[in-house]
C-alpha cells in the first residue's frame, strides 16, 4: 500500500525492511535480522548485513549457564573411516534444463 513508482532509494529500503520485519514477527522460521541488498541500475551494489536486529539474543545467551557436560570436545566422536565415494551422475546436465519466464 505504501509503494510508489517515484520512491527514493532510502524510502524503498525502509519499505522492504518493514516487509521483512512483518515476516520475522509472523513466521517463526524467518530468522531474526533484516539484511538488505540494493542493486542500482548503474550496477553498483550496497549490502546491508544486520541493518535491523529486533531480536538481539546475545544478552540472553550470555545469561544462560550451561553445564560443561554438554560441551562436545574434539575427539568425542570416533572417526571409523575416511573413504570418499564420488556420487554417480544423474544423467542430467544444464543442456537438459529448459528455462522459461516466470509468470507475473
Image: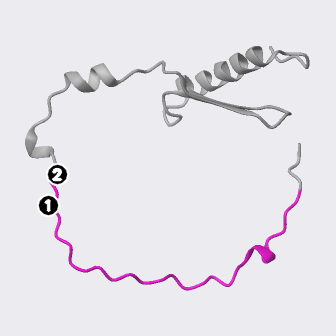
Q: Residue at x 89, y 42 (%)?
A: 104
Q: Residue 85 occupies which quadrant of the picture? A: bottom left
| SS under mark 1 | loop
Magenta span: predominant SS is: loop
Residue 86 is situated, as x and y percent measured from the top left of the image, at 48, 83
Q: Which residue is mark 1?
A: 76
Task: Report how far apart the C-alphas of labels 1 and 2 lie in the structure.
Answer: 6 Å
Q: Which residue is mark 2?
A: 72
Q: Residue at x 23, y 24 (%)?
A: 62
Residue 71 is situated, as x and y percent measured from the top left of the image, at 15, 46
Q: Residue 66 occupies which quadrant of the picture? A: top left
Q: Are marks 1 and 2 in contact (CB under 8 Å)?
A: yes
Q: Is residue 45 left or right of residue 54?
A: right
Residue 101 is situated, as x and y percent measured from the top left of the image, at 89, 54
Q: Residue at x 43, y 21 (%)?
A: 55
Q: Which residues are the magenta region?
A: 72-100
Q: Residue at x 80, y 31 (%)?
A: 40
Residue 55 part of the magenta-drawn span: no
Q: Residues within 10 Å of mark 2 (few under 14, many from 20)?
A: few
Picture layout, residue 104 above or below residue 48: below
Quadrant (top left, top right, bottom left, bottom right) of the N terminus: top right
Q: Is residue 86 left or right of residue 26?
A: left
Q: Nearer the viewer, residue 103 or 92?
A: 92
Residue 86 part of the magenta-drawn span: yes
Q: Residue 52 occupies which quadrant of the picture? A: top right
What coloring was used for the rendering? one colour
Picture layout, residue 94 above or below residue 1: below
Amino acid at each position: 500500500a505504501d509503494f510508489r513508482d517515484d520512491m527514493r532509494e532510502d524510502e524503498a529500503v525502509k519499505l522492504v525492511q518493514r516487509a521483512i520485519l512483518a515476516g520475522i514477527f509472523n513466521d517463526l522460521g524467518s530468522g531474526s535480522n533484516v539484511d538488505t541488498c540494493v542493486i542500482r541500475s548503474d550496477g553498483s551494489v550496497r549490502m546491508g548485513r544486520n541493518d535491523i536486529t529486533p531480536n538481539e539474543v546475545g544478552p540472553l545467551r550470555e545469561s544462560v549457564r550451561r553445564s560443561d557436560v554438554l560441551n562436545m570436545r574434539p575427539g568425542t566422536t570416533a572417526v571409523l573411516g575416511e573413504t570418499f565415494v564420488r556420487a554417480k551422475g544423474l544423467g542430467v546436465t544444464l543442456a537438459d534444463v529448459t528455462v522459461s519466464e516466470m509468470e507475473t
